[in-house]
Structures are given as C-alpha cells and as structure tokens.
Image: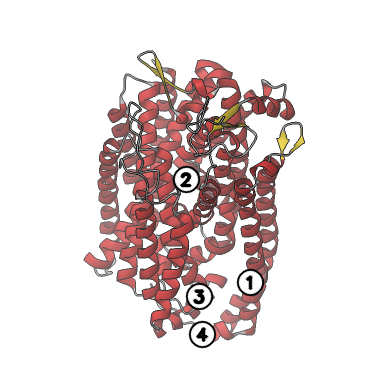
Amino acid sequence: MTPTPHDWAAIERLPEFRELVRAKRAFVVPATLFFLVYYFALPALVGYWPGLMSTPVVGHVNVAYLFALSQFVMAWALMAAYVRRARRYDRMAEALVQRLKERT
Amino acid sequence: MNPSLLMFLLFVGVTLGITIWAARRTRTTTEFYSAGRRITGFQNGWAVAGDYMSAASFLGIAGLIAFYGYDGFMYSVGWLVAYLTVLLLVAEPLRNTGRFTMADVLAFRLREPVVRVVAAISTLTVSLFYMIAQMVGAGSLVSLLVPSIGFNTAIVGVGVLMLVYVIVGGMLATTWVQIVKAVLLMTGTILLSILVLSKFHFSPLAFFDAVANVTGSFCADGVARAGVCPDGSAPIVRDFTQPGLYYHGPWGALSLMSLGIALIFGTAGLPHILVRFYTVPSARAARTSVVWAMILIGSFYIMTTFLGFGAATLVGKARIGVVTAGRLVPNQNLAAPLLAREVGGEVFLSFVSAIAFATILAVVAGLTIAASSTFAHDIWFTFVKRQREDEREQVLVARITAAVIGLLSIGLAIALRSLNVAFLVGLAFAVAASANVPAILLTLYWRRFNTTGMLAGMLVGLLSAVALIVASPAVMGVDAPGVAVRHLIQRPPLFPLDNPAIVSVPLGFVAAIAGALLRRDPDAEAAYSELTVRANTGLGAV
C-alpha cells in the first residue's frame, strides 16, 4: 500500500470529522438496535407463543404471517431512511476532503 | 433431446460467451479479483442478489415451506433483514479500507501475516461448505431430472464449468454470470408466482384458505407423526398458515432464535458477498449495490410464499419427491420444480430446472473466486512471496487455486452426497457469523481491538461453531431401524439445537473482546485513526 502524506490522527481530531462520525452514529446505532429488536421479536413470538401468533386477521391470513411481511417493509423503510441520510454524510465527507486538499 | 438439458446448455453457451469476452479484459490482479472496480452499483446489486440467492434459497426454502408451512418462511425473513447489518455497518467501511479480500479489512491495523492466514482459513472453510452444499444440490437435481446423466457426472460437469468461468474470466465473467442468473431467477419466480395465484383467481384470501386446509401434525416429543403418539395421546395438528410445524417441542423456540442469529449476522461475514463490494468504484456505489440487492432479494423472498405454499396446496407434500422402483422417495428440494410442472407443464418445468442449475453454477463460481482470491492474495503473497508484488504470478496462483478448490469440492461433494444440503449451508452461515463477524465489527468500531482479540475471536468462533454442529441433531442421532440412515453419527445428540449460532456467536464475541483486553497493542490503536478516517471519508481508497 502506498504511504499517504496524511496525518490521520490530526484529521481524526478535526471538528468536521468528529461531526461526521457523530452524525452517522446518531442514526446507525439506534437504527441497528431497532432492527435487531424488531427482528428478534419475530422468532421469539412465533417460537414461544405460536397459538397467539396464529390468530387470524383477514380470512386465514394470521398475525404471524403479517408480522413476517412487516419485516420486509421495516427493512426497506430503514434502508430508504439510511440512504436519504447518507447523502448528507457524503456531502460532509466531501467538504472535509476538499478542505484537506486545499490545506496541502 | 431433454428440454431441461437444452435450456441449460443455452445458459451455458451464453455465459461462456460472456467468459470469453471477459477474459480479454482480465490481466491485472485488480481485474481478476475485482473486475477492475468498474461494475456500477446497480449492476453489482444484481450480482450480489445473484450470489446470495443460492440453491438453498430457491429450492431449499420452497421445500421447507411445502413440507412445514409457515416455519420455512422464517429463513426468507432472516435472509433479507440480514442485509441491514451489511448496509448500516459493513459495506461502506469495507469498500473504503480493503482491496481484494475480507482479510484486507482485518489486516488493515492488525499484524498482517497471522491475521491474513486465519482469515483465509475461515474464508476457505465457509466457502468450501457452502460450495459442497451447492454441488450436492446440483448433483441430486440433475440425477433426478435427467436420470441418464447420473449424480457424479452432474457434479463433475458443474465443477468443470464453474472452473472455466473463474479461471478464464475472473471476477468480470463471474459478475456477469451472476447478473444473467439473477435476471433469470427473478423472471422464473415472478412467472411461477403469477401462475400459482391464477389458480386462485388472483385472490390472496382464497390462496390462504387453501393453505389453511393443508395440515401437519407432531407429538409432544417433537417428532412429526400422524396417528397415535408413543404416549397414547393424539398428535398436535396445525395448519400450514400457523407456526410450529418445524420448530416445536422443548427446544423449538430456542432453535428458531439460534437460526435467527445465524441468518442475521452470517451474511455480513460471507466472504463471497463481501468481496462483491470491491468490484464497484466507491463506497457510495457499494451502498447503491446493497440497496438494489435488498429490493431484489426482498421481492424474491416474499415470492417464496407463493412457491412454497403453492407447492403445498397444488402439489402436496405426498407427491414431492422422485418415484424410484414404484415408491416415492420424498425430496424437499424438488418442491419448486414440481410446482412448475403442475402449473406450467413440462416446458415450464424445464425452464425452472434450468434456472435452478444456473443458480447453482453461478453461486459456485462466486464462491470459487472468493476462495481463490484469499489463497493467492492472503496466503501465497504474504508468506511465499513476502509481499513482493508480481501481478502476473498472483493471477496465475489464483487460477491454479481455483482449479484445486474446484477439484477438491468435486471430490468432497461426491463423498458427501448423502449429506443434507440445508445443513451444509447452515454450517457456512454459522461459521461466518461466529468467526468472521465479531472480528470485522470490532476492528471497524473498537479502537482497543488488536491481533490477540482477533485470533481468539476467530478461532473460538470457528471451532465452537463446527464442534457444536457436529454434536447437534443434524449430525448425531439414532435412526429407527429400517429407515434410510440420515445421521452421520448414530448416537444421541450432545447439543440439542440444530443451529449453533446462539452459543457460538456470543462465544466468538466474548473471546474476541477478552483476547483484546488481555494485552495492549499501541500500534493497532494508533492505526485506528487511519482506519476510521479512511472508512468514513474514502480518503486513500483504491
């Protein structure tokens, strides 16, 4: 790997960089916790309360199936939310890189 | 000529054309391993989907739903939601800090040679198990659909073909083979779903009414039985819309949780999926890849409901299998092809079977390239060549490795032909989740992580996952006399769950954290600055 002239520790201390990491973390950490809880609720409910989950909602479509389908909606919605925010992270990263280039 | 064979040969012809085209564009290591990083995010999304939707997804899930109803759908859900881990935590930093293999990310700030070797061993283990499963699947499918070809010939055929793709065409050919296969698989699945729904006048409610008419039963000891249970009581009956036909009994719920852990974390540790993110030019394109992959994979897995429940209602599990000497031998893997015959006739059966072969072939090619890259890049060039770059030789070594791995998996697949395919894929996911994921996440997000932690985590994760699977009901069990032998070891299982993840994943994390706390490594901590800056900004990314 070619050595780069960057002083990584100094960049890491820049307020812009810390703001970028903080902004990402503010979304990624709660989002990850949320999807883990939402996902594991499915095997837990289905595994421990199969009777309750078999309650029909419309015709023979039951709570278990609808909850499983909602996982797909949840995954796509979270994906969309992340992609929208990621555009801002991209802009922040670009601005930071731009500033570093100007300095050198 | 057999129409399935004809369609399969058509697929082979087209993909070989792609391979020859790709071969002319593949000379350097970057071209061989990473398709020159010129694949777009959209294309790579299809390729990720193609790499991911293996025989286990298309044949396996449809079979599980057709035999056990709702519980089989749990695989579909877990395999999609798993991509949130990849999207939020892994894809972008991986793209920004690595070059060719999964080990690149781990070697970034840890001590290189030893890290690369352990990561390479883990990669090879995961890939080989995954690969044997695909080839056993292919062999069974061919020998069942075209009995004149035979199991061993089928495996050799699949093995040789995938070697041609990888050795001649490298990552570029492999990527386009995935894309063609993913398009075919989506088309076939959409057609099959429409045909199934047309039998119910496109009314989902009517469809579910029919599904609810299909029932299964099991006894309190967890064994599926009809009639009277050993203790004299009547078996518990559930219809196919209800959970519990597969996961029940004293360990059912825990098994289901354990499977969930393997699926949710395993994907982020699958080497053949991770290397796909090196084929795109930037972290942003890696993100776009995951987005397209999630849209495709999610749509596909929702449609597994129509395939699986369709097979349960229109074919019926009593008819899913092959008639040998006048007796039906049940085979879950044939649910989707037999459903195709039921709703679309022989020609559609051929189309769907050809898609199944294409699926297997493409996944095997993807696995081979990941495995041969890691051997050439992480073992050969770290140890034998001491990091002296010689691109021509590295590509040659990768090609030779691909040949060796191909021959090895052909041999193993023939030797292990009686093993359950889902069991092998489950092993691959559990090993990936237990060995690779703790190391990847901790090196990306924990400054204090170091080489000791990585070695402890990977070795404990790898060994505990493999050991627990060997001790599980998937391998150990006493088969009733007169029934075909299903278990490799004829003893009562030592571990009650059929997936080890609920134990081996936490073990992997605990070992990785404890190992790291055991000693300090100032170099690894200092290098975290470079890792986090590059991971977050893309500075210095190749």
What whole-number distance in Å separates the C-alpha atoms at marks 2 and 3? 30 Å
Mark 3 residue type = Trp
Location of mark 4 (residue): A9
| Residue at the left extreme of this rendering | B384
Residue B218 appears at what percent x and percent y? 53, 33
Q: Quadrant of the N terminus of chain B?
A: top left
The reply to whether label 4 and label 2 mark residues of one chain is no
Location of mark 3 (residue): B446
Q: Are marks 4 and 1 in contact (CB under 8 Å)?
A: no
Query: Counting other residues with Cα less than 10 Å from the Cα at mark 3, is it few (<14), some (14-19), or many (20 or more)?
Result: few
Q: What is the secondary structure assignment of the residue under circle 1?
A: helix
Chain identity of mark 2? B
For the point 31% across and 45% down, the residue is B167
Foreground pick, A45 / B126: A45
What whole-number distance in Å separates the C-alpha atoms at marks 4 and 2? 38 Å
The numbered dot on residue A25 is 1
The reply to whether label 2 and label 3 mark residues of one chain is yes
